[in-house]
Protein backbone atom coordinates (compact mmCIF):
# COMPACT_ATOMS: atom_id res chain seq x y z
CA UNK A 1 0.00 0.00 0.00
CA UNK A 2 1.19 3.52 -0.70
CA UNK A 3 1.68 6.23 1.88
CA UNK A 4 -1.44 8.08 0.73
CA UNK A 5 -3.57 4.93 0.80
CA UNK A 6 -2.36 4.12 4.32
CA UNK A 7 -3.25 7.60 5.53
CA UNK A 8 -6.62 7.66 3.74
CA UNK A 9 -7.53 4.37 5.46
CA UNK A 10 -7.13 6.09 8.86
CA UNK A 11 -9.32 9.12 8.07
CA UNK A 12 -12.60 7.65 9.45
CA UNK A 13 -10.92 6.92 12.81
CA UNK A 14 -9.31 10.37 12.85
CA UNK A 15 -12.67 12.02 12.15
CA UNK A 16 -14.40 10.02 14.88
CA UNK A 17 -11.76 10.92 17.46
CA UNK A 18 -11.68 14.57 16.38
CA UNK A 19 -15.48 14.76 16.63
CA UNK A 20 -15.37 13.34 20.13
CA UNK A 21 -12.63 15.79 21.16
CA UNK A 22 -14.19 18.93 19.73
CA UNK A 23 -17.91 18.18 19.95
CA UNK A 24 -18.49 19.93 16.62
CA UNK A 25 -18.39 18.54 13.06
CA UNK A 26 -16.83 21.63 11.47
CA UNK A 27 -14.13 21.95 14.12
CA UNK A 28 -13.46 18.21 13.88
CA UNK A 29 -13.01 18.44 10.11
CA UNK A 30 -10.57 21.33 10.60
CA UNK A 31 -8.63 19.32 13.17
CA UNK A 32 -8.43 16.31 10.83
CA UNK A 33 -7.25 18.53 8.00
CA UNK A 34 -4.59 20.12 10.21
CA UNK A 35 -3.49 16.64 11.33
CA UNK A 36 -3.23 15.31 7.78
CA UNK A 37 -1.39 18.39 6.59
CA UNK A 38 1.10 18.08 9.46
CA UNK A 39 1.57 14.34 8.84
CA UNK A 40 2.21 14.75 5.13
CA UNK A 41 4.57 17.68 5.59
CA UNK A 42 6.56 15.73 8.18
CA UNK A 43 6.40 12.30 6.59
CA UNK A 44 10.18 12.02 6.76
CA UNK A 45 9.92 11.97 10.59
CA UNK A 46 7.65 8.91 10.66
CA UNK A 47 9.35 5.67 11.56
CA UNK A 48 7.64 2.56 10.19
CA UNK A 49 5.39 1.07 12.82
CA UNK A 50 1.92 2.03 14.04
CA UNK A 51 0.71 4.73 11.65
CA UNK A 52 -2.57 5.20 13.54
CA UNK A 53 -0.76 5.93 16.81
CA UNK A 54 1.50 8.44 15.04
CA UNK A 55 -1.48 10.23 13.44
CA UNK A 56 -3.38 10.26 16.73
CA UNK A 57 -0.32 11.74 18.44
CA UNK A 58 -0.23 14.52 15.89
CA UNK A 59 -3.97 15.12 16.33
CA UNK A 60 -3.72 15.16 20.11
CA UNK A 61 -0.86 17.65 20.00
CA UNK A 62 -2.71 19.89 17.50
CA UNK A 63 -5.82 19.81 19.69
CA UNK A 64 -3.88 20.67 22.85
CA UNK A 65 -2.00 23.47 21.09
CA UNK A 66 -5.22 24.92 19.71
CA UNK A 67 -6.86 24.75 23.14
CA UNK A 68 -3.91 26.60 24.70
CA UNK A 69 -3.62 29.27 22.03
CA UNK A 70 -6.04 31.97 20.95
CA UNK A 71 -9.13 30.72 19.20
CA UNK A 72 -9.37 31.71 15.57
CA UNK A 73 -12.54 29.77 14.86
CA UNK A 74 -15.42 30.03 17.28
CA UNK A 75 -16.51 26.45 17.89
CA UNK A 76 -19.63 25.86 19.98
CA UNK A 77 -19.03 24.41 23.43
CA UNK A 78 -20.83 21.76 25.42
CA UNK A 79 -24.18 23.51 24.99
CA UNK A 80 -24.30 22.27 21.39
CA UNK A 81 -24.09 18.48 21.45
CA UNK A 82 -22.93 16.90 18.21
CA UNK A 83 -25.43 15.41 15.81
CA UNK A 84 -25.00 11.74 16.55
CA UNK A 85 -26.36 8.97 14.37
CA UNK A 86 -29.47 7.41 15.87
CA UNK A 87 -30.94 3.96 15.60
CA UNK A 88 -34.58 3.21 14.96
CA UNK A 89 -35.94 3.29 18.51
CA UNK A 90 -36.55 6.33 20.67
CA UNK A 91 -34.93 4.84 23.76
CA UNK A 92 -31.68 4.23 21.92
CA UNK A 93 -31.58 7.90 20.95
CA UNK A 94 -32.15 8.98 24.53
CA UNK A 95 -29.49 6.60 25.85
CA UNK A 96 -26.98 7.83 23.30
CA UNK A 97 -27.71 11.46 24.15
CA UNK A 98 -27.32 10.71 27.86
CA UNK A 99 -24.04 8.89 27.18
CA UNK A 100 -22.68 11.83 25.14
CA UNK A 101 -23.73 14.23 27.90
CA UNK A 102 -22.05 12.10 30.57
CA UNK A 103 -18.94 11.66 28.42
CA UNK A 104 -18.68 15.44 28.02
CA UNK A 105 -18.78 15.83 31.81
CA UNK A 106 -15.58 13.82 32.24
CA UNK A 107 -12.32 15.68 32.52
CA UNK A 108 -10.50 16.10 29.22
CA UNK A 109 -7.70 13.71 30.22
CA UNK A 110 -10.16 10.96 31.23
CA UNK A 111 -12.24 11.45 28.08
CA UNK A 112 -9.15 11.25 25.84
CA UNK A 113 -8.00 7.97 27.40
CA UNK A 114 -11.49 6.44 27.29
CA UNK A 115 -11.86 7.34 23.62
CA UNK A 116 -8.44 6.10 22.59
CA UNK A 117 -8.63 2.80 24.49
CA UNK A 118 -12.37 2.11 24.36
CA UNK A 119 -13.46 3.55 21.04
CA UNK A 120 -10.31 3.41 18.94
CA UNK A 121 -9.13 0.11 20.48
CA UNK A 122 -5.55 1.31 20.99
CA UNK A 123 -3.25 -0.43 23.42
CA UNK A 124 -2.23 1.21 26.68
CA UNK A 125 1.28 1.57 25.28
CA UNK A 126 0.10 3.35 22.12
CA UNK A 127 -2.23 5.56 24.15
CA UNK A 128 0.63 6.48 26.48
CA UNK A 129 2.80 7.43 23.50
CA UNK A 130 0.03 9.52 21.94
CA UNK A 131 -0.67 11.41 25.15
CA UNK A 132 2.96 11.58 26.24
CA UNK A 133 2.34 10.04 29.67
CA UNK A 134 3.47 6.81 31.40
CA UNK A 135 1.41 3.65 30.94
CA UNK A 136 0.49 3.72 34.63
CA UNK A 137 -1.07 7.15 34.15
CA UNK A 138 -3.12 5.82 31.23
CA UNK A 139 -4.35 2.93 33.37
CA UNK A 140 -5.18 5.24 36.27
CA UNK A 141 -7.03 7.76 34.08
CA UNK A 142 -8.90 4.95 32.35
CA UNK A 143 -9.99 3.39 35.63
CA UNK A 144 -11.11 6.70 37.13
CA UNK A 145 -12.80 7.72 33.88
CA UNK A 146 -14.74 4.47 33.65
CA UNK A 147 -15.76 4.72 37.30
CA UNK A 148 -16.95 8.31 36.91
CA UNK A 149 -18.76 7.52 33.64
CA UNK A 150 -20.58 4.61 35.30
CA UNK A 151 -21.64 6.87 38.18
CA UNK A 152 -22.83 9.60 35.82
CA UNK A 153 -24.81 7.11 33.73
CA UNK A 154 -26.37 5.69 36.90
CA UNK A 155 -27.43 9.20 37.87
CA UNK A 156 -25.27 9.49 40.95
CA UNK A 157 -22.63 12.19 41.00
CA UNK A 158 -19.23 10.83 41.95
CA UNK A 159 -16.67 12.90 43.74
CA UNK A 160 -13.79 13.92 41.50
CA UNK A 161 -11.17 12.31 43.73
CA UNK A 162 -11.07 9.81 46.56
CA UNK A 163 -7.59 10.93 47.57
CA UNK A 164 -7.14 12.39 51.04
CA UNK A 165 -4.62 14.98 52.07
CA UNK A 166 -2.32 13.59 54.74
CA UNK A 167 -0.28 15.93 56.89
Image (tube, rainbow, N blue to C red):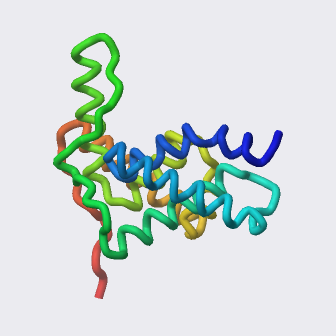
Q: Is residue 38 above or below residue 152?
A: below
Residue 45 horizontal/vertical position (percent)? 75, 68
Q: Which residue is outermost to the top?
A: 88
Q: Residue at x 44, y 63 (%)?
A: 63
Front residue of 7/167: it is 7
Position of 92 relative to 17 (above/below): above
How many numbered dots are placed on residues in this image?
0
Most extreme residue toward the bottom is 167
**Corner quadrant of residue 80:** top left
Q: In the rendered view of the protein, which quadrant contains the N terminus? A: top right
Viewer-side residue, 125 vs 48: 48
Q: Is residue 99 above or below residue 105?
A: above
Between 166 and 61, the one nearer to me in the picture: 61
* Residue in the image at 30% along x and 53% along y: 106
Report the residue at 16% width, 48% height from top.
79
Residue 111 location (% of width, % of height): 39, 53
Give the residue drawn at x 29%, y 19%: 92
Quadrant of residue 82 within the rendered picture: top left
Q: Quadrant of residue 97?
A: top left
Residue 167 percent across, percent down from the top left: 29, 88
133 to 110, vertically: above or below: below
Query: Percent position (x, y) of residue 143?
Result: 44, 52
Amino acid sequence: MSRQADIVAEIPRLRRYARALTGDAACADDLVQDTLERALSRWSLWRPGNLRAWLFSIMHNRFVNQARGPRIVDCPGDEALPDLPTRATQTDSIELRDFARCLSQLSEVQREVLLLVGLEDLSYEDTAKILGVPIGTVMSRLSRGRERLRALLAGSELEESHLKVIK
